[in-house]
Image (spheres, rainbow, N blue to C red):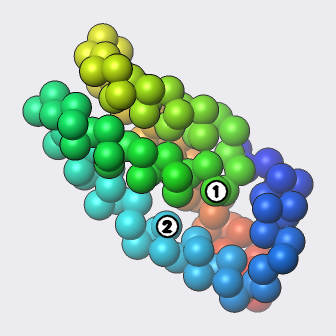
Amino acid sequence: MIDRQMFNDMFNNLDKENIVELIDIFFSQYEERFEAIRKNVTERDFDHLKETSHKLKGALVLFMDPVTSQLSKRFVEMARSNTEAGLDQMLADLEKNTRILVEELKVIRKELSS
């Protein structure tokens, strides 16, 4: 769940249009990033997983959702250490929480656009 106070603090220097643009950029990229990550996990391609998961983490932490941010950080740590045990479950948890984040961002986007 997005911490709205932290979210507002993070973006207090941006106008509404710029925040909407950041949200839209995230929306346009996150599914493709997860597709690449799922492929990397399936193939146990940790070299590419390190890169793809790090890019996703950078996008996720921006939106001040502590649970999803923490999951993404742990996922990156697993990728960096080539940890296979629990990787599939961690990916499932990360995807589930990202879907929740996306729904919250849709609400915020609508608020900012009205």
Q: Judge the density around disc 1: few (<14), some (14-19), many (≥20) Cα neighbours within 10 Å.
A: some
**Can see residue 110?**
no
| Residue 72 locus on image (x, y percent) | 50, 37
Residue 46, picture quadrant: top left
In the picture provided, is 103 more to the left or to the right than 64?
left
User: Disc 1 to disc 2, how far (Cα)?
Assistant: 10 Å
User: Any mark on residue 62, and which?
Assistant: 1
Question: What residue type is disc 2 on?
Answer: Phe
Taking the spot 59% from the left edge, 82% from the top edge, the residue there is 21
Q: Nearer the viewer, residue 34 or 75?
A: 75
Mark 1 or mark 2: name the one nearer the start of the chain.
2
Q: Is residue 88 above or below residue 100?
A: above
Look at the numbered discs 1 and 2 and tell me whether their residues touch, using CB distance below 8 Å: yes
Q: Residue at x 27, y 39 (%)?
A: 49
Label 2 crowd (10 A; few <14 / some 14-19 / many >=20): some
Q: Which mark is residue 105?
A: none
Residue 5: x and y in percent read 88, 54
The vertical placement of 81 against 107, above or below, is above
Local SS, label 1: loop
Q: Quadrant of the C terminus?
A: bottom right
Q: Quadrant of residue 13?
A: bottom right
Q: Is residue 53 visible?
A: yes
| Residue 54 place in picture, x, y as percent | 42, 45
Query: SS at mark 2?
Result: helix
**Which residue matches tag 2?**
26
Identify the residue at image location x=58%, y=71%: 23
User: Residue drawn at (31%, 16%), measured in percent from left and top?
Assistant: 83
